[in-house]
Amino acid sequence: MVQGGPPDDNLFRAFASAIYNTIDAPVTWFREKIVEPNQKKYPWYHQKFRRVPTIDQCYSDDVVCDFEANAQFKRDRAVDSEILNILRMRYEDCMMYERPDHLTVCKPFWEKYKDAEEAWFIKYGDLGAYADARKAYMKQKHRMIWERRNGPLSDQTK
Amino acid sequence: MVSWSALGRSFGTNLFKNNIKAPFVVQNVNFSVGKKLASDHGHRTMALQPSRWQWHKFKDMFHYYLMMGLIPVGAIIFYTNVFIGPAQLTPIPDDYHPKHWEYHRHPITRFIARYIHNSPQQEYEKFLHFIDEEAQRQKLRALEKEVTRKMAERNDYQAYYYRPMVNKYLRINKKAGDDIMERVGDDYKD
């Protein structure tokens, strides 16, 4: 709440917040007076997973190594998708705040997001519904062969 | 109107014969007050009315689910949220390895993860062992299949579950026979 400046004597704002507070004030009072003093404080953590050998370091008949590499691939893909999400939300927040001149003001966010999206697609895109660590590895192999014949694909792969 | 069942047929005919009371009509349904039954003393009457069984059953079920379901579960949830509360996210201390239930936020989830479920690491390792054992079985089966295929191809062993004679000389003789066949052919006069 912003404290300071001349007191707000806008009638309509007062009326609107009075209506809001008919629901909000009892709930807030209950939470602050009864719920929060009684709650215990104890921690929870985010799990950190160890790095295991990736699919290119596994023998071809080693199913255990293959399964672990796959699990790691899926975790990495989830993390990368979330990172992309955060970059996109940053751009969208900037755009909504700065509209109508968002095209110039939010350009750095847009550039970063587009680069990240391209990199994500190069690594994980078009693998289908049953994406695998092995399929991603093969995709990388095909891309490198294509690049050897046709030159670099984009800035992200240099 | 009212339909007479087999049980009430005599009762119904009695009613019909002795119905001197004014009919009791509610919303076009004729409630007839029954004649007193023979086995009672006093004047008990049975009201012939449409069945209220569904309403009674609804009340039963409502009370059951409220008392056994909503109130105890609601009380437990209220207690855990108000007096225990969800956990705070903290970075992992350096020398500490958290237990698997300490990765959840809500106390009921933590309870379930701690006392009801197996730890995810245990399940993961069990699965790894299972697929490893299955892969070994696959390799054994593949090897057996390859051996029987070679036996079928070369025709030098009859089976593999009893110990045959040594087939080395059989193979040498067969090879010699094949060479002769190549050189001379199978042209013979009978």
Image (cartoon, helix red, strand yellow):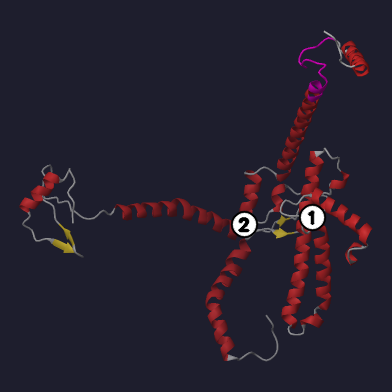
Question: Residue at 53% of width from left, 81% of height from top?
Answer: A19
- Residue A15 inside the magenta-drawn segment: no
Tell me where residue A108 appears, x and y as whole percent: 84, 76
Q: Position of residue A29 (x, y in %)?
A: 57, 72
Q: Chain of mark 1?
A: A
Secondary structure beneath dot 2 equals helix
Of residues B40 and B55, which is closer to you in this image?
Answer: B55
Q: Residue type at mark 1: give it.
A: Asp
Viewer-proximal residue, B75 or A84? A84
Residue A156, position in %: x, y? Answer: 88, 64
Is label 2 or label 1 in front? 1
Q: Quadrant of residue B50?
A: bottom left
Q: Which residues are magenta?
A: B149-165
Label of residue B120 in the image:
none
Looking at this view, name the residue that lies furthest to the top: B190
The answer to which quarter of the image holds residue A101 is bottom right
Residue farthest toward the front in the current orientation of the protein: B189
For the residue pair B136 and B12, the one nearer the viewer reads as B136
Residue drawn at x 78%, y 15% as measured from the top left: B158
- Give the crowd class for mark 2: few <14, some 14-19, many >=20 residues within 10 Å: some
Which residue lies under the disc numbered 1?
A76
Instruction: Answer with left or right where residue B181 lies relative to residue B71.
Output: right
Instruction: Classify the position of the C terminus of chain B by image quarter.
Output: top right
Which residue shows up at 73% across the image and 81% down it?
Answer: A97
Q: Is residue A137 above or below residue A99?
A: above
- From the image, tell me which residue sits under label 2: B84
* Residue B82 vs residue B6, the one in the foreground: B6
- Residue A8 visible to an observer of this rendering: yes
- Residue B94 in sight: no
Residue B40, image x, y percentages = 13, 44
> Which secondary structure, mark 1?
helix
Name the chain under label 2.
Answer: B
